[in-house]
Structures are given as structure tokens and as C-alpha cells.
């Protein structure tokens, strides 16, 4: 139904906008309009498609848990590694570098500082039982350096680490 060139949808949208702007308590809050009925999202064509997070756990949930699961257990059938034993890699020469060079980390969409933060969170929470006593936290500079040297053959690099672990009496899975 149209009234003088306006559709009901257009009139309804105008009504919502009028209502939101005419409410004495309405004010702009971080791109949302607070109204007495709640918040109305203001749509912007150039709105970022990122979800702001405030913790390493939240970054893990958004960028890693989809494959590795919330508890870090991964999936054998999908060949997704179990992250709960990552501390074992830190006991093997080259393992520390390997953890932040794998494609899932490199292509996670996280910046260097976020990768360091999430990796440290995973190691200190999900992989806590496997951690060596002298572990030093990752930092953004170390992640940046690792990104300059991406792995060419992940399987071969992991195989070498498994061999080195065996020589040290440790057990690392060859592949998930």
C-alpha cells in the first residue's frame, strides 16, 4: 500500500527514526541509538566486520575453537591437532617456533600481539599440564619474526620434531 508516493515500509522506518529521535532520553551510544524500547542499531555501509574482544579466551573462541574445540581437544577424524599437549613441543628444539608457524596460526587473522596473547593463554590454560617449568611467554616480536619464515612443509617439520622428541624420550603424535 502506498500513500502519496511512500510505501508502508518507508513510513514505518521514518516512524522508528522519528520515535528514536524524539525520545528525550535517546542519545548516540557507540553507533547505536538508545531508546526507551532498547537500542536501535544504526547501519553503516563501511562498518567493520570484526568483533571486538577483550580477552585472549575470546580471541581463541572466535579464531581457534571452531576447529580445535573449546577445550582444545581438536578432532582426529578432521585431522585437527589436540592443543592440550602443546607444552611438549616447547621441550623439543624447534618446537617453540613450530607452534607459531603452523598455517592455522599464520592465517588466523590475528595480529602479532594477539597471536602471542592467544598462544600464551592456550599454553597456560588448555596445555598447562604439559608445560615445561622454564617456559617463557611469547611476545609480538617473536611472532613477527616467525611470520617472516613460514613453514614450507608442515608435515616434514612436524616429523622432524617427532623424531627429536623420541630421542628425548617424549611422545609427540606424528599427525592428528
Image (spheres, rainbow, N blue to C red):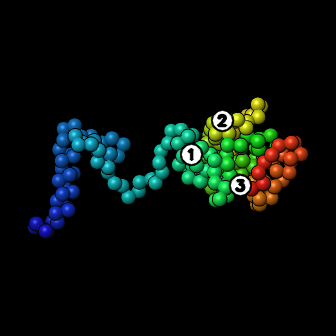
Position above or below: 106 against 123: below
Quarter the N terminus occupies: bottom left
Using the numbered discs, state the Cα–Cα distance from disc 3 to disc 1 in whole angstroms.
17 Å
Report the residue that reaches farthest toward the right.
Answer: 167
Mark 2 or 3, nearer chain start: 2
User: Residue 65, image x and y in percent?
Assistant: 57, 49
Query: At x 18% / y 41%, what residue is drawn?
Result: 23
Q: Is residue 144 visible?
A: no
Name the one closer to the observer, 116 or 133: 133
Query: At x 78% / y 54%, what residue is drawn?
Result: 174
User: Residue 80, image x and y in percent?
Assistant: 66, 55
Instruction: Identify the residue position indicated by label 2 in the image.
Output: 124
Mark 2 or mark 1, which is nearer to you? 1
Number of numbered discs visible in the structure rendering? 3
Report the residue that reaches farthest toward the front.
Answer: 77
Mark 3 or 1, nearer chain start: 1
Mark 3 crowd level (few <14, some 14–19, many ≥20, 10 Å Cα)? few
Q: Secondary structure at mark 2?
A: helix
Q: Is residue 102 visible?
A: yes
Which image quadrant is residue 141 in? top right
Mark 2 or mark 3, which is nearer to you? 3
User: Residue 6, image x and y in percent?
Assistant: 15, 65
Q: Is residue 117 left or right of residue 145?
A: left
Mark 2 or 1, nearer chain start: 1
Amino acid at each position: 500500500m502506498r500513500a502519496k508516493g511512500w510505501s508502508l515500509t518507508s513510513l514505518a522506518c521514518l516512524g522508528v527514526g522519528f520515535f528514536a529521535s524524539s525520545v528525550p532520553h535517546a542519545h548516540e551510544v557507540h553507533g547505536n541509538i538508545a531508546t526507551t524500547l532498547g537500542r536501535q542499531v544504526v547501519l553503516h555501509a563501511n562498518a567493520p566486520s570484526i568483533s571486538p574482544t577483550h580477552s585472549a579466551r575470546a580471541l581463541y573462541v572466535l579464531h581457534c575453537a571452531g576447529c580445535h574445540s573449546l577445550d582444545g581437544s581438536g578432532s582426529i577424524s578432521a585431522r585437527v591437532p589436540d592443543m592440550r599437549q602443546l607444552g611438549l613441543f616447547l621441550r623439543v628444539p624447534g618446537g617453540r617456533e613450530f607452534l607459531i608457524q603452523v598455517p592455522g596460526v599464520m592465517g588466523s587473522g590475528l595480529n602479532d600481539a594477539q597471536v602471542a596473547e592467544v598462544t600464551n593463554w592456550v599454553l597456560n590454560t588448555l596445555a598447562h599440564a604439559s608445560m615445561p617449568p622454564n617456559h617463557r611467554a611469547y611476545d609480538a616480536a617473536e611472532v613477527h619474526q616467525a611470520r617472516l619464515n613460514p613453514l614450507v612443509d608442515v608435515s616434514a617439520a612436524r616429523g622432524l620434531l617427532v623424531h627429536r622428541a623420541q630421542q628425548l624420550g617424549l611422545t609427540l603424535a606424528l599427525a592428528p
